Amino acid sequence: MIRLATGPVAEVALIGAHCDDIAIGMGATLLTLARRQPRLRVRALVLCGAGTERENEEWAALEAFCPGAHLELTVLDLPDGRTPAQWDRVKRALNTFRRQTNPDLVYAPQPRDAHQDHRLLAELTPTEFRDHLILGYEILKWETDTPTPTLYQPITEEVAEEKARLLLKHYPSQVDRDWFDAQTFLGLTRVRGVQCRAPHAEAFVVAKVSVEFGG
């Protein structure tokens, strides 16, 4: 497998439908980025959960997943499970978010996610971030929508275990779900690690990317 490096990353944009989507999909990647780039700027937009315990969980979680980074988080109050009916609000929120950030990388749900809220974000994000590298993260759940990824972020076993620990610590409202446990999170990162010859990894879907070979 050929490894490509982006060089320094100063700012990333994170987009999620629900509080915990970002951390589940790319928590280990965030830990890795923040430790490699001490002055990393992280701007995050979450569509649902404003004014609830879920918003408090999200703040605490992202602060833990982005140690030393400058974090800016916006949580909106769109209805969970019904954001496609709020198409105009989602589009306007993404447009506002886009004008507030100039990221090196954009992370959003992967386009074939079976959850309607995730899928809408995956469809609309490229309409606002037209000239950016958009990495679609995966959220393991009961639907059989696990993607065939095209990009991997190798992570150490230590970081994979820390991701699982932080998820369980900072999202107590989710621990009663039968899939929300360390075995689930470590199982997926181990599988993705096997696929890229690493101890563990997080995987992403990329629609298109421009590469200068030999540059």
Image (cartoon, grey):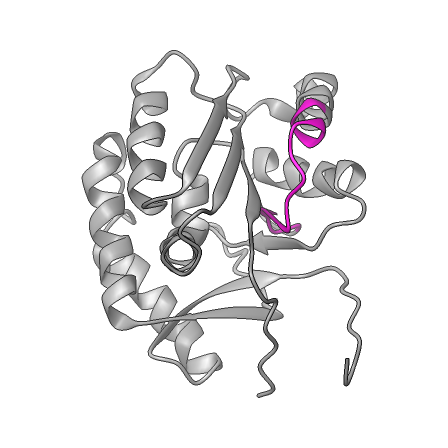
The residue nearer to you, when weighing 144 against 151, is 151
Answer whether residue 49 is magenta in the image.
no
User: With 164 as the anchor, is 32 left or right in this view?
Assistant: right
Q: Residue at x 67, y 35 (%)?
A: 120
Image quadrant occupied by the N terminus: bottom right
Residue 205 image-quadrant placement:
bottom right
How far across and how far down the image is residue 47, in percent? 54, 25
How far across and how far down the image is residue 127, in percent? 80, 38
Image quadrant occupied by the C terminus: bottom right
How far across and how far down the image is residue 133, in percent? 70, 55
Q: How many marks?
A: 0
Extent of the magenta region = 96-111
The residue nearer to you, when weighing 150 against 210, is 210
Does the rendering let one see residue 143? yes
Does the rendering let one see residue 141? no
User: With 44 as the anchor, is 91 left or right in this view?
Assistant: right
Q: Residue at x 52, y 70 (%)?
A: 152
User: With 57 as the anchor, is 37 left or right in this view?
Assistant: right
Residue 178 vertical position relative to residue 74 in the rendered view, above or below: below
Q: Residue furthest bottom?
A: 1
Residue 64 image-quadrant placement:
top left
How far across and how far down the image is residue 206, in percent? 68, 61
Q: Residue at x 23, y 61 (%)?
A: 161
